[in-house]
Amino acid sequence: MPRVGRVVLPNYPHHVVQRGHNRQVVFAEDADYRYYLETLEAFKTIYDIKVYGFCLMTNHVHLILQPGEAIADLGQLMKRLAGRQTRFVNRQESRSGTLWEGRYKSSPIETDAYLLACCRYVELNPVRAGMIDTPAAYPWSSYRWHAGEDVEQDWLDTDPCYDALGSNAEERALRYRTFVRSAIPEGEWTLIREALQRGQLTGGERFTDQVEAMINRRIENRKHGRPRRMRLRDDRQ
């Protein structure tokens, strides 16, 4: 079966996943996680990539990345991230060989409708996996930064949807915590997961029409709906 052509859009966020080779462990110690994040922080500036969210699991990574005008830079960033981490782990473990699957998965995100939903999906990964009970208990994701609980991740970029949650940092953090704790609309996780697996768009019909016109190519599997809008409320109790 021919490989599906990757859709990468300039100035749009993308949900990106890269897995360990044969699903092997890629992060065995705290130093492994830290090294990956340090590399991501350094290379995001080199390649003009905005980082809106992340979650590093033991055998794969989830990233929310937005390239600038040069869409090839997204692939270059992922290539250098993978290569540098492989060399680090191989030195630490006195081993050789590949660490990652050869091809990462990515899905452009319809910003207004799905960006916050994708960040929530990414940051709840360790909860879904049964590793912890709350996202705040996991140190290797962007949740603590979005929730206003971690100032060390100030290298992350503020996406426009998160910025619109409030007029100041405290209000945005509060409303994001409320959003993550709220009920997940039926079908939202399935939609996000399948869009990523197929290399399709995480968005609705209108977004698909816009992208098809932009790239002059038909995009299959047009089955995306629109998630329920977030209800903003103050839960100070």
Image (spheres, grey):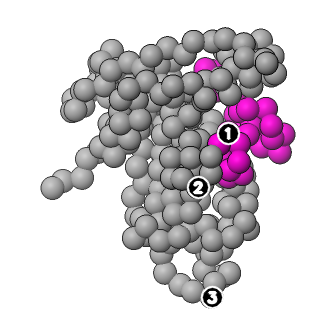
User: What is the secondary structure assignment of the residue under circle 3?
Assistant: loop
153 left or right, relative to 160: right
At label 2, counting other C-alpha atoms closer than 10 Å, the crowd grade (few under 14, some 14-19, many 20 or more) is few
User: What is the secondary structure assignment of the residue under circle 1?
Assistant: helix
Q: Nearer the viewer, residue 108 or 132?
A: 132
Q: Residue furthest left?
A: 1
Check the image and report above or below for 119 versus 92.
above
Q: Which mark is residue 143?
A: 1
At label 1, counting other C-alpha atoms closer than 10 Å, the crowd grade (few under 14, some 14-19, many 20 or more) is many
Queried whether the magenta region covers residue 160, the answer comes back as yes
* Camera sees residue 36: yes
Residue where numbered disc 2 is placed: 131
Circles 2, 3 touching at the beta carbon (< 8 Å): no
| Quarter that holds the C terminus | top right
The CA distance from mark 2 to mark 3 is: 29 Å
Instruction: Report the span colored magenta.
Output: 134-161
- Residue 27, image x and y in percent? 61, 67
- Residue 109, image x and y in percent? 45, 30
Queried whether the magenta region covers residue 153, the answer comes back as yes
Residue where numbered disc 3 is placed: 94
Query: Residue at point 39% right, 70% down?
Result: 22
Query: Residue at point 62% right, 75% down?
Result: 89
